[in-house]
Image (tube, rainbow, N blue to C red):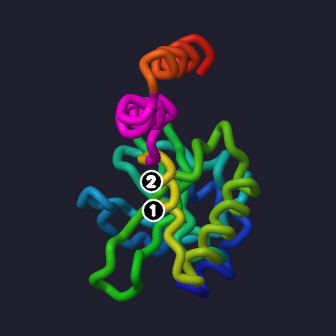
Amino acid sequence: CLLFFKTFRACWCQRVSLGFSPCGRQLADRKGAEVAEREVRLTQRVVDAARPEAARYALSDTDIPGFRLLVWPSGRRGFYFRYRVGGGRAATVREPKIGEAPAMKAERARAIASDWAAQVRLGGDPSGTRQAARSAPTMTELFDRYLSDHARPNKKASSLAEDERLIRDYL
């Protein structure tokens, strides 16, 4: 397979658009569906040349392990970063989305994937950090908690009414 890449490196974009897979491995995605995977350095030229096929497939980057471009039969393309949380084969596999291909250029997605790969090497969890930020309490929840836990038990009725008015009108 390596000899094949050295011989035909110049026409990789044409092979992608024709659906040719010199090292087409079948992998399962996070939902268990099979995805054909091909390895190539993900550049903007390769991303632009990736054409939809009958089944979804992935183009994996050769430089950054886990950095992938998924291409759907509908023509949708998205950058993803696949990694394991905690290490080992029994660890949870996460595959957060970096961005959509037409809106995000390959170099920007590569920079984000490189940052996330560095975090994973240091024991971090980029997707877990994003999920924690999304599950953080909203300002409305914090104001309700302030009123129920502090203002109603500890303040006079006039001060409580003023706090409720300020929260309602200004915050």
Q: Which residues are magenta?
A: 136-155
Closer to the camera, 131 or 25?
131
Tell me if 151 is positioned left or right of 121 in this view.
Answer: left
Q: Which mark is residue 131?
A: 2
Do callouts 2 and 1 mark residues in contact (Cβ within 8 Å)?
A: yes
Report which quarter residue 112 is drawn in: bottom right
* Amino acid found under the numbered disc labelled 2: Gln
Q: Which mark is residue 128?
A: 1
Tell me if 31 is positioned left or right of 155 in this view.
Answer: left
Judged from this view, the residue extending furthest toward the left is: 32
| Residue 72 forms part of the magenta stretch | no
Q: Residue at x 63, y 64 (%)?
A: 113
Q: Can you say whether 126 is above or below 141 in the image?
A: below
Q: Which mark is residue 43?
A: none
Q: Residue at x 73, y 52 (%)?
A: 44
- The secondary structure type at the circle numbered 2 is helix
